[in-house]
Amino acid sequence: MLSVVVGTGRCGSTLVQEVLSRHPAVGFISGVDDKLPKLNLAGRFNGTLYRRLGPRPSGMTSLRHSRRLLERGRLRVAPSEAYHLLDRHVFAGFSKPSRDLVADDLTPFVKRRMREFFDDRIRRQGCDVLLQHLTGWPRTGFLQAAYPDLKVINVVRDGRAVANSWLQMGWWDGWRGPDNWLYGPLPPALREEWEEAGRSFPVLAALGWKMLMEAYTQARAAHPAEQWLDVRYEDLVRAPNEQTARMLAFLGLDWTPRFESGFARHLFHAERGAAYRHELTDTQVAAIQGVLDKPLREWGYE
């Protein structure tokens, strides 16, 4: 079965993917596989190797944007979003679409390639669940058109924290403006909000979260309720056992002793939940909250 962990990016979805991949019945595409896309490796030993190693150090970003050449935990087999592989072997526009990819975007040609790509990895890894990690646009409707039984774990984080984190990431290209960044053009109403905010970059980051979350709302509405699970990052770090058990049950997996031994190696940090309050100015926080008031409340944030 193919399932996905999705989120806006900087929302905790990597943590969720890595925790769930500790389960012996879960398979995944590794960063090693993705760095060698021409070889199209199926990752037969990904799970075995990964579950022997420690968790990813908190705060680690991609090697390209790392400030240090050598980092503890950098060299390891671990789950990846695998965009190099997916672009090469499934669909060249998968990693950076200018809008969400939906069911109507899937052609019979791409559907065949997608089924071959994921089914081969499920078979070679011998897993009950192949768990794929995606950030940015949901793309869940696109995948569900090929896999009707697709299950989706959507990781949600406070948009103020996400916007603050995006501004600190080397890959965030919002500095080039919404006509040139990776998410495609802002809808007219959001463009107007950005202009009214004096083209503030913190506000632009917040509007990016707002735009993506609207896409997730629409994607959720297109899926059967029993195949979609929202998990708030704040709830996960507050009650990791409870929320992880909830996700395992959703995927049809038991909390086994082997999973417990891997789960126990992970640390859940709650202290950065409101870091935006001292890493942004009061004026910037107020501007962000001004454009995010409605979606924050809709997703359960005060």
Image (cartoon, grey):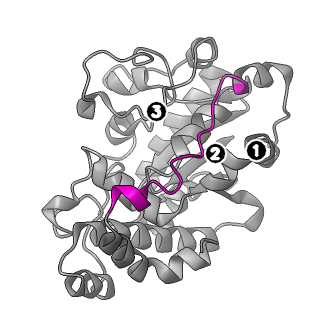
Q: Amino acid at mark 2?
A: Ser
Residue tagged by mark 1?
251
Q: Amino acid at mark 1?
A: Leu
Task: Depth check: give the residue in front, 170 or 22.
Answer: 170
Q: Residue at x 45, y 42 (%)?
A: 113
* Residue 129 position within the rendered picture, expressed as x and y whole percent measured from the top left: 69, 35
Secondary structure beneath disc 1?
loop
Q: Residues within 10 Å of mark 3 (few under 14, many from 20)?
A: many
Residue 222 visible: no
Task: Depth check: give the residue in front, 50 or 107.
Answer: 50
Residue tagged by mark 3?
80
State the predominant SS element of the stretch in magenta. Answer: loop
Residue 267: within the magenta?
yes
Cα distance in 3D space between marks 3 and 2: 14 Å
Q: Amino acid at mark 3?
A: Ser
* Residue 152 position within the rendered picture, expressed as x and y whole percent measured from the top left: 64, 54
Task: Depth check: give the residue in front, 258 or 281.
Answer: 281
* Residue 214 position within the rendered picture, expressed as x and y whole percent measured from the top left: 48, 74
